[in-house]
């Protein structure tokens, strides 16, 4: 689960980097789009890992948050493709909260 969580954080970082460059006028839309696909994959892996963990431990909230994040990546991509930045940017922050929350939990001390 930790590997999928870290991968999701790294991809999210890439998305923020390319988003900032896009706002600055750089031609990085292809890289940002590829990052969106990578975010679908990494958060999908995070969902699978969290569900397997939940099955073993009966702690289900990380799987629920991961499922919401995974679904939201598709909504986020559709809104971004439509060009609605007034919704796309706040959703990016919501995705960040969900991903970082599950990642922090994945690295908590046992016990």
Image (cartoon, rainbow, N blue to C red):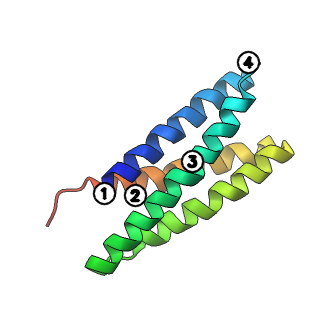
Sort mark 4 into few (<14), some (14-19) or many (20+) by Cα contacts within 10 Å. few
| Between discs 1 and 3, the one toward the N terminus | 3
> Distance from label 4 to label 1 (Cα)?
35 Å
Q: Which mark is residue 102?
A: 2
Where in the figure is residue 37, as x and y percent of width and height? Answer: 63, 46
Q: Sequence order check: which comes first, mark 2 or mark 3?
A: 3
Circle 2 packing at 10 Å, graded few (<14), some (14-19), many (20+), is many
| Mark 4 to mark 2 CA distance (whole Å) | 32 Å
Secondary element type, mark 1:
helix
Under circle 3, the secondary element is helix
Tell me the quarter of the picture where residue 38 sits.
top right
Q: CA distance from mark 4 to mark 3?
A: 21 Å
Image disc number at residue 106: 1
**Residue 1: quarter of image:** bottom left
Label 2 to label 1: alpha-carbon separation: 6 Å
Give the residue displayed 31% in from the left and 81% down from the top. Answer: 58
Please name the residue shown 34% across and 75% down the image. 54
Are the residues at dot 4 and dot 3 in contact (C-beta closer than 8 Å)?
A: no
Give residue 104's position: percent from left, percent from top: 33, 52
- In this rendering, which labeled residue sits more in front, label 1 or label 3? 3
Q: Is residue 40 left or right of residue 42?
A: right
């Amino acid at each position: 689960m930790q590997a999928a969580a870290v991968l999701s954080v790294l991809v999210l970082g890439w998305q923020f980097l390319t988003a900032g460059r896009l706002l600055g006028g750089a031609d990085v839309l292809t890289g940002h789009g590829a990052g969106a696909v990578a975010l679908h994959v990494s958060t999908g892996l995070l969902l699978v890992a969290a569900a397997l963990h939940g099955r073993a431990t009966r702690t289900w909230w990380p799987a629920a948050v991961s499922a919401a994040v995974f679904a939201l990546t598709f909504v986020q991509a559709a809104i971004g493709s439509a060009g609605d930045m007034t919704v796309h940017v706040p959703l990016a922050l919501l995705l960040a909260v969900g991903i970082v929350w599950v990642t922090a939990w994945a690295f908590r001390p046992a016990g």
